[in-house]
Image (cartoon, coloured by chain):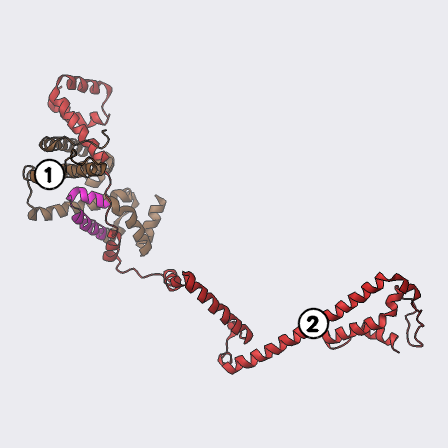
Chain colours: A red, B brown
């Protein structure tokens, strides 16, 4: 094998692409030819240097430069614009202020009875806000009053019932009520004599509650009141 | 491959974000290729930018049947580098190895400051100077094979030459690079390869 033939086969030899027989012939030549051995060693080192060379990092603005040169100034999309708009609100101090403002606004809107889905010109008038707020105040006050009275009646009934259950001897001594003369068809004795004794009071309280609640007495109560007070 | 094709379709549809994603994927590779050809960071950046402007203008001419997008991109870059080299050759004074010796002597000696970083930088510069000494045909073959790890078939596609020519150029390029590096080493002392202790 000549020096030139070894030179031509150097890359294939180093990459292990030579057939076994040919590789043996090349190695035999390299063992006896120092200049060819040196040449192959130089190439091997050069290839190793190439493989070991680190990949270079371009400057960080290269992509932006190319973007600018190709598509121009990139217009931000809606999500990016919104994010940019709300970016300051992410800071804790401003976020707290914004939250308080939103909370206050929601209270005002709620008190003014403004329906944000169906806004009218009238809704924008501060006088309308005031009148609606006034009305809302009265409605809430009435509801609170009614709730208070309802609660009072219920508590009173419960306390009476508790009292009757805790003193069963009173039930025995309770006077048997005469059926009301005329009118009543309800001849069955009441299941609890003590309760029957206080039935008038309970009916009164229930009537008050019903009146507070609906403004009218329910038919069973009217019947019961009639039977108690002919 | 499908994701790449989808990205290309989005680029062709005019989606800026897709083009940006494509740039982020390939700009580093093309920059390295350009740097190995030009040997200067700023020039490599300029050429990289020109390559991608060309890609942006001719992206619709790419078809998957021609091969992978990476190979097509390398071919566009290589053709542009050849044009760039021809333009720059008139302006650039090619210096001989001896002319560059004073510059080479300015490199810090490994005995003076034997840190890994300095050695790495020195190796890179020595290699780049060695590559600069090769003829463009041999240089591009060696760069694509040994620095970009392309196989013979891909290199043949990029260079638009037969595989036999590619093998021959790579072999001659390596032989030449080995000789050049040895001469440089003789002038300023041994330079270790990357994986040598």
Q: Nearer the viewer, residue B12 or A165?
A: A165
Q: Quadrant of the C terminus of chain A?
A: bottom right
x and y, in percent, of residue A78 in the image: 38, 62
Residue neighbourhood size for the residue with mark 1, other residues' Cα within 10 Å, grouped as few (<14), some (14–19), many (≥20): some
Q: Say if mark 1 contacts mark 2, CB within 8 Å.
A: no
x and y, in percent, of residue A111 in the image: 55, 74
Q: Nearer the viewer, residue A150 or B50?
A: A150
Q: Is residue B88 left or right of residue A177?
A: left
What residue is disc 1 on?
B104
Q: Is residue B16 left or right of residue A206?
A: left
Can you tell which quarter of the image residue B71 is in?
top left
x and y, in percent, of residue A197 in the image: 88, 69
Q: Which residues are magenta?
A: B30-54
What residue is disc 2 on?
A148
Number of residue marks: 2
Q: Quadrant of the N terminus of chain A?
A: top left
């Amino acid at each position: 094998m000549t020096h030139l033939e070894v030179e031509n086969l150097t890359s294939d030899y180093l990459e292990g692409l030579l057939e076994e027989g040919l590789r043996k012939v090349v190695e035999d030549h390299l063992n006896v030819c120092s200049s060819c051995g040196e040449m192959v060693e130089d190439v091997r080192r050069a290839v190793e240097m190439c493989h070991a060379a680190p990949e270079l990092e371009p400057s960080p603005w290269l992509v932006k430069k190319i973007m600018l040169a190709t598509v121009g100034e990139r217009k931000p999309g809606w999500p990016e614009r919104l994010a940019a708009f709300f970016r300051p609100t992410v800071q804790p101090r401003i976020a707290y202020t914004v939250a308080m403002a939103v909370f206050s606004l929601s209270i005002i809107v709620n008190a003014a009875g403004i329906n944000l889905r169906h806004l009218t010109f009238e809704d924008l008038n501060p006088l309308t806000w005031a009148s609606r707020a006034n009305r809302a105040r009265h409605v809430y006050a009435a509801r609170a009053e009614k709730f208070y009275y309802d609660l009072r009646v219920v508590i009173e009934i419960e306390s009476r019932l508790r009292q009757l259950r805790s003193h069963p001897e009173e039930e025995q001594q309770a006077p048997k009520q005469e059926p009301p003369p005329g009118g009543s068809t309800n001849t069955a004795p009441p299941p609890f004599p003590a309760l029957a004794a206080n039935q008038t009071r309970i009916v009164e309280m229930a009537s008050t509650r019903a009146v507070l609640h609906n403004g009218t007495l329910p038919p069973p109560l009217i019947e019961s009141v009639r039977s108690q007070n002919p | 491959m499908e994701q790449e094709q989808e990205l290309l379709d989005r680029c062709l549809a005019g989606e800026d974000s897709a083009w940006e994603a494509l740039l982020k994927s390939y700009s580093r590779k093309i920059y390295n290729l350009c740097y190995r050809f030009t040997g200067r960071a700023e020039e490599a950046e300029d050429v990289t930018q020109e390559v991608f402007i060309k890609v942006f203008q001719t992206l619709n001419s790419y078809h998957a049947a021609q091969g992978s997008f990476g190979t097509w991109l390398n071919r566009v870059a290589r053709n542009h580098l050849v044009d760039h080299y021809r333009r720059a050759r008139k302006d650039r004074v090619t210096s001989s190895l001896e002319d560059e010796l004073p510059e080479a002597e300015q490199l810090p000696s490994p005995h003076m400051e034997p840190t890994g970083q300095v050695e790495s930088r020195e190796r890179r510069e020595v290699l780049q100077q060695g590559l600069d000494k090769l003829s463009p045909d041999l240089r591009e073959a060696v760069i694509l094979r040994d620095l970009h790890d392309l196989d013979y078939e891909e290199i043949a596609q990029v260079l638009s030459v037969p595989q036999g020519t590619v093998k021959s150029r790579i072999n001659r390029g390596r032989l030449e690079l080995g000789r050049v590096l040895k001469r440089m080493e003789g002038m300023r002392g041994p330079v270790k390869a990357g994986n040598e202790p």
